Amino acid sequence: MPQTPIMGDGLPQPLLEMLGDQYFVYGWDTSDNSEALARSVGVITYGHPRVDGHLLDRMPNVRVVSNHGVGVDHIDVAAATARGIPVGNTPGCLDKATADMTMALLLASARNVVIGDTFARGPEFTHYDPSILIGHEVSGCTIGIVGMGRIGKQVARRASSFDMPILYHNRRRDEEAEREFGAQYRSLDDLLRESDFVTLNCPLTAETKGLIGRRELELMKPTGTLINMARGPVVVTADLYEVLKAGSIRGAALDVTDPEPLPRDHPLLTLRNLVIAPHLGSASHKTRHRMLTMTVENLAAGLAGLALPYQVHSN
Protein backbone atom coordinates (compact mmCIF):
# COMPACT_ATOMS: atom_id res chain seq x y z
CA MET A 1 0.00 0.00 0.00
CA PRO A 2 1.58 3.36 -1.01
CA GLN A 3 2.37 5.85 1.73
CA THR A 4 0.37 9.07 1.99
CA PRO A 5 2.67 12.03 1.26
CA ILE A 6 2.50 14.93 3.69
CA MET A 7 4.64 18.01 4.25
CA GLY A 8 5.98 18.52 7.78
CA ASP A 9 9.48 19.70 8.55
CA GLY A 10 11.33 18.82 11.75
CA LEU A 11 8.62 16.56 13.16
CA PRO A 12 9.69 15.00 16.48
CA GLN A 13 10.14 11.26 16.79
CA PRO A 14 6.98 10.72 18.90
CA LEU A 15 4.89 12.36 16.18
CA LEU A 16 6.57 10.32 13.46
CA GLU A 17 5.80 7.19 15.47
CA MET A 18 2.14 8.20 15.74
CA LEU A 19 2.00 8.73 11.97
CA GLY A 20 3.53 5.29 11.47
CA ASP A 21 4.25 3.65 8.14
CA GLN A 22 1.10 5.00 6.54
CA TYR A 23 2.69 8.39 5.81
CA PHE A 24 5.69 9.64 3.93
CA VAL A 25 6.88 12.95 5.39
CA TYR A 26 8.53 15.55 3.17
CA GLY A 27 10.76 18.26 4.55
CA TRP A 28 9.70 21.89 4.21
CA ASP A 29 10.80 22.49 0.61
CA THR A 30 9.14 25.45 -1.11
CA SER A 31 11.38 25.71 -4.16
CA ASP A 32 9.79 26.10 -7.58
CA ASN A 33 10.31 22.47 -8.58
CA SER A 34 9.58 21.04 -5.15
CA GLU A 35 8.30 17.47 -5.21
CA ALA A 36 6.93 18.03 -1.71
CA LEU A 37 4.64 20.81 -2.93
CA ALA A 38 3.49 18.85 -5.93
CA ARG A 39 2.70 15.59 -4.17
CA SER A 40 1.68 16.39 -0.59
CA VAL A 41 -1.97 15.91 0.28
CA GLY A 42 -1.63 17.16 3.84
CA VAL A 43 0.44 19.65 5.81
CA ILE A 44 1.58 19.48 9.43
CA THR A 45 2.88 22.79 10.75
CA TYR A 46 5.37 22.20 13.55
CA GLY A 47 7.41 25.14 14.79
CA HIS A 48 5.38 27.86 13.01
CA PRO A 49 6.35 27.69 9.33
CA ARG A 50 4.38 30.17 7.24
CA VAL A 51 1.40 28.81 5.29
CA ASP A 52 -0.32 31.34 3.06
CA GLY A 53 -2.31 31.48 -0.13
CA HIS A 54 0.78 31.67 -2.30
CA LEU A 55 2.08 28.41 -0.86
CA LEU A 56 -1.29 26.67 -1.02
CA ASP A 57 -1.73 27.64 -4.66
CA ARG A 58 1.42 25.65 -5.39
CA MET A 59 0.08 22.58 -3.57
CA PRO A 60 -2.73 21.34 -5.83
CA ASN A 61 -3.42 18.15 -3.90
CA VAL A 62 -3.54 19.42 -0.31
CA ARG A 63 -6.71 18.53 1.57
CA VAL A 64 -5.86 19.59 5.15
CA VAL A 65 -3.50 21.73 7.24
CA SER A 66 -2.96 20.38 10.76
CA ASN A 67 -1.25 22.72 13.19
CA HIS A 68 0.70 21.42 16.19
CA GLY A 69 -0.42 24.07 18.67
CA VAL A 70 -3.27 26.47 19.28
CA GLY A 71 -1.95 29.71 17.78
CA VAL A 72 -2.44 29.89 14.03
CA ASP A 73 -1.07 33.36 13.33
CA HIS A 74 1.45 31.73 10.97
CA ILE A 75 -1.37 30.23 8.89
CA ASP A 76 -3.64 32.27 6.65
CA VAL A 77 -6.83 30.50 7.70
CA ALA A 78 -9.00 32.66 5.45
CA ALA A 79 -6.86 31.80 2.42
CA ALA A 80 -7.05 28.09 3.24
CA THR A 81 -10.82 28.26 3.77
CA ALA A 82 -11.30 30.07 0.47
CA ARG A 83 -9.53 27.14 -1.22
CA GLY A 84 -11.65 24.55 0.57
CA ILE A 85 -8.78 23.43 2.79
CA PRO A 86 -9.70 22.97 6.47
CA VAL A 87 -7.23 24.01 9.17
CA GLY A 88 -7.01 22.20 12.51
CA ASN A 89 -5.28 23.09 15.75
CA THR A 90 -5.04 21.74 19.31
CA PRO A 91 -7.29 23.84 21.56
CA GLY A 92 -7.90 23.22 25.25
CA CYS A 93 -5.15 20.73 25.94
CA LEU A 94 -2.46 23.28 26.77
CA ASP A 95 -4.44 25.75 28.86
CA LYS A 96 -3.27 24.49 32.24
CA ALA A 97 0.35 24.06 31.21
CA THR A 98 0.47 27.57 29.77
CA ALA A 99 -1.17 29.01 32.87
CA ASP A 100 1.41 27.17 35.00
CA MET A 101 4.17 28.80 32.97
CA THR A 102 2.54 32.21 33.31
CA MET A 103 2.69 31.88 37.09
CA ALA A 104 6.20 30.42 36.94
CA LEU A 105 7.48 33.50 35.11
CA LEU A 106 5.53 35.81 37.39
CA LEU A 107 7.08 34.20 40.47
CA ALA A 108 10.55 34.00 38.93
CA SER A 109 10.52 37.71 38.23
CA ALA A 110 8.96 38.68 41.55
CA ARG A 111 11.42 36.66 43.64
CA ASN A 112 14.60 37.11 41.57
CA VAL A 113 14.87 33.40 40.87
CA VAL A 114 17.01 33.69 37.73
CA ILE A 115 19.38 36.32 39.12
CA GLY A 116 19.54 34.33 42.35
CA ASP A 117 20.40 31.13 40.53
CA THR A 118 23.26 32.84 38.70
CA PHE A 119 24.53 34.39 41.92
CA ALA A 120 24.29 31.12 43.85
CA ARG A 121 26.44 29.38 41.22
CA GLY A 122 29.01 32.18 41.08
CA PRO A 123 32.21 32.88 43.00
CA GLU A 124 30.74 35.77 45.02
CA PHE A 125 28.33 33.61 47.02
CA THR A 126 30.53 32.68 49.97
CA HIS A 127 28.16 33.47 52.84
CA TYR A 128 24.47 34.10 53.39
CA ASP A 129 23.52 37.78 53.29
CA PRO A 130 19.86 38.46 54.14
CA SER A 131 20.03 41.95 52.62
CA ILE A 132 20.46 40.93 48.96
CA LEU A 133 17.98 40.26 46.15
CA ILE A 134 14.91 41.37 48.06
CA GLY A 135 11.89 40.58 45.91
CA HIS A 136 8.16 41.12 46.02
CA GLU A 137 5.56 38.94 47.68
CA VAL A 138 2.94 37.89 45.19
CA SER A 139 0.13 37.32 47.68
CA GLY A 140 -2.12 40.32 47.81
CA CYS A 141 -0.69 41.92 44.67
CA THR A 142 -3.10 42.76 41.86
CA ILE A 143 -2.86 40.75 38.66
CA GLY A 144 -4.19 42.14 35.40
CA ILE A 145 -5.00 39.47 32.82
CA VAL A 146 -5.19 40.61 29.20
CA GLY A 147 -7.26 37.93 27.49
CA MET A 148 -9.76 36.12 29.71
CA GLY A 149 -10.08 33.08 27.44
CA ARG A 150 -9.40 29.47 28.34
CA ILE A 151 -5.80 30.17 29.36
CA GLY A 152 -6.68 33.44 31.06
CA LYS A 153 -9.26 31.66 33.22
CA GLN A 154 -6.66 29.09 34.27
CA VAL A 155 -4.31 31.94 35.21
CA ALA A 156 -7.11 33.53 37.23
CA ARG A 157 -7.72 30.23 39.04
CA ARG A 158 -4.06 30.05 40.04
CA ALA A 159 -3.88 33.73 40.95
CA SER A 160 -6.87 33.38 43.25
CA SER A 161 -4.95 30.71 45.18
CA PHE A 162 -2.31 33.36 45.84
CA ASP A 163 -4.99 35.75 47.15
CA MET A 164 -4.36 38.11 44.26
CA PRO A 165 -7.10 40.59 43.34
CA ILE A 166 -7.88 39.93 39.66
CA LEU A 167 -8.49 42.50 36.95
CA TYR A 168 -9.02 41.54 33.33
CA HIS A 169 -9.41 43.05 29.90
CA ASN A 170 -11.19 41.29 27.06
CA ARG A 171 -13.00 42.17 23.87
CA ARG A 172 -16.15 41.65 25.92
CA ARG A 173 -16.96 41.20 29.58
CA ASP A 174 -16.98 37.66 30.98
CA GLU A 175 -19.58 37.50 33.74
CA GLU A 176 -18.77 33.86 34.43
CA ALA A 177 -15.16 34.73 35.24
CA GLU A 178 -16.35 37.62 37.37
CA ARG A 179 -18.55 35.31 39.42
CA GLU A 180 -16.03 32.47 39.71
CA PHE A 181 -12.87 34.45 40.46
CA GLY A 182 -14.17 37.80 41.62
CA ALA A 183 -12.46 39.26 38.55
CA GLN A 184 -13.18 42.88 37.70
CA TYR A 185 -13.34 44.17 34.15
CA ARG A 186 -11.16 47.14 33.23
CA SER A 187 -10.28 49.05 30.10
CA LEU A 188 -6.75 48.20 28.99
CA ASP A 189 -5.41 51.54 30.19
CA ASP A 190 -6.96 51.19 33.64
CA LEU A 191 -5.75 47.61 33.95
CA LEU A 192 -2.21 48.71 33.19
CA ARG A 193 -2.40 51.54 35.74
CA GLU A 194 -3.81 49.42 38.55
CA SER A 195 -2.00 46.07 38.21
CA ASP A 196 1.18 44.96 39.92
CA PHE A 197 1.57 42.13 37.41
CA VAL A 198 0.20 42.31 33.86
CA THR A 199 -0.06 38.97 32.07
CA LEU A 200 -0.66 38.77 28.33
CA ASN A 201 -2.69 35.65 27.55
CA CYS A 202 -4.40 36.77 24.35
CA PRO A 203 -4.05 35.42 20.81
CA LEU A 204 -2.07 37.30 18.19
CA THR A 205 -4.52 39.00 15.85
CA ALA A 206 -4.57 42.17 13.80
CA GLU A 207 -6.06 43.89 16.85
CA THR A 208 -3.47 42.64 19.34
CA LYS A 209 -0.33 43.07 17.25
CA GLY A 210 1.66 45.86 18.90
CA LEU A 211 -0.95 46.09 21.65
CA ILE A 212 1.71 46.88 24.26
CA GLY A 213 4.07 49.66 23.21
CA ARG A 214 5.78 52.55 24.94
CA ARG A 215 2.56 54.38 25.76
CA GLU A 216 1.03 51.32 27.39
CA LEU A 217 4.19 50.35 29.25
CA GLU A 218 4.52 53.84 30.68
CA LEU A 219 0.99 53.57 32.07
CA MET A 220 2.15 50.71 34.30
CA LYS A 221 3.26 51.19 37.88
CA PRO A 222 7.02 51.77 38.34
CA THR A 223 6.90 48.60 40.46
CA GLY A 224 4.93 46.70 37.81
CA THR A 225 5.97 43.60 35.90
CA LEU A 226 4.87 42.52 32.41
CA ILE A 227 4.55 38.80 31.60
CA ASN A 228 4.09 37.84 27.94
CA MET A 229 2.67 34.36 27.36
CA ALA A 230 0.82 35.39 24.19
CA ARG A 231 2.97 35.92 21.10
CA GLY A 232 6.04 38.07 20.68
CA PRO A 233 4.49 40.68 18.34
CA VAL A 234 1.83 41.57 20.93
CA VAL A 235 4.62 43.64 22.53
CA VAL A 236 6.71 46.20 20.65
CA THR A 237 10.20 44.85 21.35
CA ALA A 238 12.13 48.09 20.92
CA ASP A 239 9.77 49.93 23.26
CA LEU A 240 10.02 47.21 25.89
CA TYR A 241 13.80 47.43 25.82
CA GLU A 242 13.82 51.20 26.26
CA VAL A 243 11.33 51.10 29.13
CA LEU A 244 13.17 48.31 30.93
CA LYS A 245 16.54 49.95 30.40
CA ALA A 246 15.22 53.20 31.85
CA GLY A 247 13.73 51.36 34.83
CA SER A 248 10.29 52.80 34.13
CA ILE A 249 8.80 49.47 35.23
CA ARG A 250 10.31 46.94 37.60
CA GLY A 251 10.71 44.14 35.09
CA ALA A 252 9.34 41.77 32.49
CA ALA A 253 9.21 38.03 31.92
CA LEU A 254 8.80 36.66 28.40
CA ASP A 255 8.05 33.20 27.09
CA VAL A 256 7.82 34.62 23.56
CA THR A 257 9.69 37.37 21.73
CA ASP A 258 9.68 39.24 18.45
CA PRO A 259 11.65 38.05 16.62
CA GLU A 260 11.80 34.53 18.02
CA PRO A 261 14.44 33.69 18.92
CA LEU A 262 16.09 37.04 19.50
CA PRO A 263 19.43 37.56 17.75
CA ARG A 264 22.20 36.58 20.15
CA ASP A 265 23.44 40.16 20.28
CA HIS A 266 20.02 41.70 20.94
CA PRO A 267 20.15 44.36 23.67
CA LEU A 268 17.20 42.83 25.55
CA LEU A 269 19.47 39.92 26.46
CA THR A 270 21.73 42.24 28.44
CA LEU A 271 19.07 43.35 30.91
CA ARG A 272 19.00 42.00 34.46
CA ASN A 273 15.38 43.00 35.01
CA LEU A 274 14.18 40.61 32.33
CA VAL A 275 13.50 36.87 32.47
CA ILE A 276 13.27 35.00 29.14
CA ALA A 277 12.18 31.42 28.49
CA PRO A 278 12.41 29.71 25.08
CA HIS A 279 8.66 29.37 24.38
CA LEU A 280 7.93 26.74 27.04
CA GLY A 281 4.25 27.50 27.58
CA SER A 282 2.94 24.10 26.50
CA ALA A 283 6.14 22.17 27.21
CA SER A 284 4.94 19.52 29.61
CA HIS A 285 4.98 15.80 28.82
CA LYS A 286 1.22 15.41 29.30
CA THR A 287 0.31 18.43 27.20
CA ARG A 288 2.71 17.75 24.35
CA HIS A 289 1.50 14.15 24.04
CA ARG A 290 -2.09 15.34 23.77
CA MET A 291 -1.07 17.96 21.20
CA LEU A 292 0.58 15.29 19.07
CA THR A 293 -2.52 13.11 19.25
CA MET A 294 -4.84 15.96 18.26
CA THR A 295 -2.53 16.92 15.38
CA VAL A 296 -2.74 13.39 13.95
CA GLU A 297 -6.51 13.23 14.51
CA ASN A 298 -7.01 16.43 12.51
CA LEU A 299 -4.72 15.22 9.73
CA ALA A 300 -6.44 11.84 9.41
CA ALA A 301 -9.92 13.36 9.39
CA GLY A 302 -9.02 15.91 6.73
CA LEU A 303 -7.46 13.31 4.46
CA ALA A 304 -10.55 11.14 4.82
CA GLY A 305 -12.80 14.02 3.85
CA LEU A 306 -14.36 14.19 7.32
CA ALA A 307 -14.96 17.19 9.54
CA LEU A 308 -11.88 18.00 11.59
CA PRO A 309 -12.42 17.32 15.30
CA TYR A 310 -10.58 20.56 16.18
CA GLN A 311 -11.14 22.86 13.23
CA VAL A 312 -10.21 26.53 13.09
CA HIS A 313 -12.78 28.77 11.44
CA SER A 314 -11.77 32.01 9.75
CA ASN A 315 -13.33 35.16 11.14
Image (cartoon, helix red, strand yellow):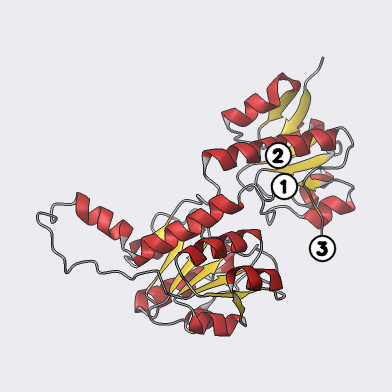
| Residue shown at 50% from the left, 84% from the top | 193
For the residues carrying marks 2 and 1, which lies nearer the camera in this image?
2
Asked if one can make out residue 250 in the rendered structure from this viewpoint, the answer is yes
Q: For mark 2, give the secondary structure.
A: helix
In the image, 221: left or right of 215? Answer: left
Q: For mark 3, give the secondary structure.
A: loop
Give the amino acid type for the residue marked by disc 3 in the picture.
Asn
CB atoms of marks 3 and 2 within 8 Å? no
For the residues carrying marks 3 and 2, which lies nearer the camera in this image?
2
Residue 100's mark? Answer: none
Which is more N-terminal, label 2 or label 3? 2
Asked if one can make out residue 255 in the rendered structure from this viewpoint, the answer is no
CB atoms of marks 2 and 1 within 8 Å? yes
Residue 294's mark? Answer: 2
Residue 315's mark? Answer: 3
The CA distance from mark 3 to mark 2 is 22 Å
Give the amino acid type for the residue marked by disc 1 in the picture.
Asn
Residue designated by label 1:
89
The CA distance from mark 2 to mark 1 is 8 Å
Image position, residue 100 (x, y; %): 50, 54
In the image, 64: left or right of 16? Answer: right
In the image, 127: left or right of 256? Answer: left
Give the amino acid type for the residue marked by disc 2 in the picture.
Met
Q: For mark 1, give the secondary structure.
A: loop
- In this view, the residue farthest toward the top is 1
Which is more N-terminal, label 1 or label 2? 1
